[in-house]
Amino acid sequence: MTGWCLFSSRMWPRIAAGLMLAALTGCGSRPGLTGARTPVAGTVTLDGEPVPFALVEFSRDEGKGEIESAVVQNGRFELKAGGGLPEGHYSVAILPYVPEVEETASMTPEERKAITASQALVPEGYHRRGALSAEVKAPSSSGLTFAMKKGGP
C-alpha cells in the first residue's frame, strides 16, 4: 500500500459539485428586509463631536437577520430611497470603518490616515447590535441621531 486517501478520486467531482451548489443557493434562507424603502439619514457623534469615519448597521433582529449599513463620514450617513430601509424598529450598531482594498486605491493619503485614526474611536459597547435603536417611518427618517459616549452604552 503506497498511500491512503479519505476520498477516492472519483468522489472529488461530486464533492466539488455539492460545494458549488451550496455556495450558489446558500446554506439556509434568511428573511430579507421587505417592504417599501424609506430614505434614512442622520448623524453619529462621540461625546458631542462628529465621528470622522464609522459604519452604522441597521438590523430588525439583534442576534441575526439581514443588515443594511451606511458609511459615516464627518459625522453624517445616508441610505437613499433605493437603498433605504422599510418602516419599522431597528437594532443599531456602530462599528469602526474598515474600507475594502478597492476603495483605498482611490483615497488620498490624508483620507487613509483619518480612517485609521478613527478606527479606535468607536467604543466597543456600540459594536453590538442593540446597543442603539432606531424607528424608521415613511416618508423619510432623515433626522436619526446616534450619540455615543466614550464610556460606552
Image: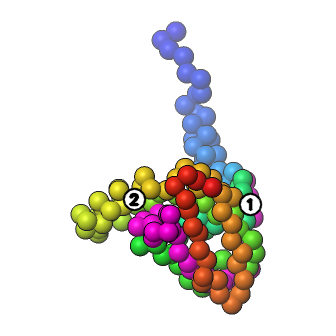
**Residue type beneath disc 1:** Asp
- Residue span colored magenta: 28-55
User: Which one is nearer the viewer's eye here, 54 or 75?
Assistant: 75
Q: Residue 126 placed where, x, y %?
A: 59, 56
Q: Which mark is residue 118?
A: 2
Drawn side of residue 28 relative to residue 50, left or right: right
Task: Name the residue at 75% across, 71% down.
Answer: 89
Drawn side of residue 121 relative to residue 104, left or right: right
Task: Name the residue at 52% across, 9% down.
Answer: 1
Query: In this picture, is 127 found above or below 16?
Result: below
Q: Earlier in the sequence, mark 2 or mark 1?
A: 1
Q: Secondary structure at mark 2?
A: helix
Q: Secondary structure at mark 1?
A: loop
Give the quadrant of residue 110: bottom left
Query: In this picture, is 16 found above or below 52?
Result: above
Give the quadrant of residue 105: bottom left
| Crowd rating for badge 1 (residues with CA inside 10 Å; few <14, some 14–19, many 20+) | some
Is 46 within the magenta?
Answer: yes
Residue 24 seen = no
| Crowd rating for badge 2 (residues with CA inside 10 Å; few <14, some 14–19, many 20+) | some
- The residue labelled by disc 1 is 61
Q: Residue 93 placed where, x, y %?
A: 60, 60
Q: Which mark is residue 102?
A: none
Is 36 within the magenta?
Answer: yes
Give the quadrant of residue 85: bottom right
**Tag count:** 2
**Residue type beneath disc 2:** Ser
User: Which one is nearer the viewer's eye here, 18 or 85?
Assistant: 85
Q: Residue 27 placed where, x, y %?
A: 69, 51
Q: Residue 45 placed where, x, y %?
A: 50, 68
Residue furthest to the bottom: 139
